[in-house]
Image (cartoon, grey):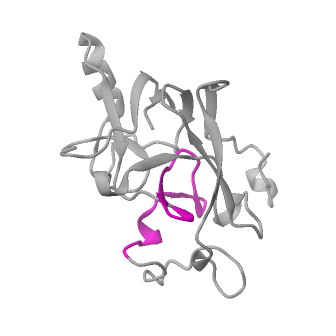
Amino acid sequence: MLRIRSLRNQYQKRLIRPLYAQTQATPYAATIDPALRDADGAYFDFSDTNLIDTFDPSVVFQHKGSWVPGTVMLNRGEVCLPSVGSGSEDERAFGLLANFVGGQLDDLGDENYIGVWRGPDSVYELLKPGFNPGEGNAKDILAAFEASKSGNPVRLHASDDGRLGVLTTPGDAVVVAHLLEAFKNRIVIDLKV
């Protein structure tokens, strides 16, 4: 359930929906680093980009000031952080964020606990803006899907804003999911982590 704090957000939908997850997926209980809170306990002062070594929270995609469900997460020991385009073997994707974090749509309140969807071969529907449609280092996801109808799978990686996308130059980036279907405002993915 979303913790809506304003009537302006009463029609906000959950952006990640498990379709085939009964035995394939696990909502993993994880923790967001408490260093991301300010002195008042609120999340994300984006003017301070040195909160955690080598992590800049200001580059993570936001909707209404919140990190969105579907963001690719990394596990760094006891805490999880959004993947911001590294995707190398050193920082392997851990799963997909299940909650809105921070901003107007914050699911966490005073807690630091989040859910991370994990499980190879589990299938999810992601609603826009929970995926990267083709901004920054990502190609147009609909065009990639149309081109893939020849039989080649569309591989999705963590884009430079943390959301799943089709990278223009994936290099050695880890495949997080395969695209099963693509529509204007939603995609269906097969998770690989």
Q: Is residue 41 left or right of residue 45?
A: right
Q: Residue at x 63, y 83 (%)?
A: 38
What residue span does the magenta drawing correspond to? Answer: 54-80
Could you tell me residue 122's position as x and y percent?
A: 54, 27
- Which residue is situated farthest in the bottom direction here? 39
Q: Which one is nearer the viewer's eye here, 97 or 105?
A: 97
Residue 23 occupies quadrant: top right
Q: Residue at x 43, y 83 (%)?
A: 50
Q: Is 117 a magenta residue?
A: no
Count all numbered tags in the image, as a single digit. Answer: 0
Q: Is residue 32 above or below residue 130?
A: below
Quarter holding the N terminus?
Answer: top right
Q: Is residue 123 visible?
A: yes
Q: Is residue 26 above or below residue 55?
A: above
Could you tell me residue 40's position as x and y percent?
A: 72, 85
Q: Is 57 a magenta residue?
A: yes
Quarter holding the C terminus?
Answer: top left
- Which residue is situated farthest in the front direction here? 77
Q: Is residue 86 visible?
A: no
- Which residue is situated farthest in the top direction here? 150
Could you tell me residue 136's position as x and y percent?
A: 30, 53
Q: Is residue 21 left or right of residue 175?
A: right
Q: Residue at x 67, y 24 (%)?
A: 22
Could you tell me residue 145's position as x and y percent?
A: 33, 23
Residue 49 occupies quadrant: bottom left
Q: Is residue 122 above or below residue 42?
A: above
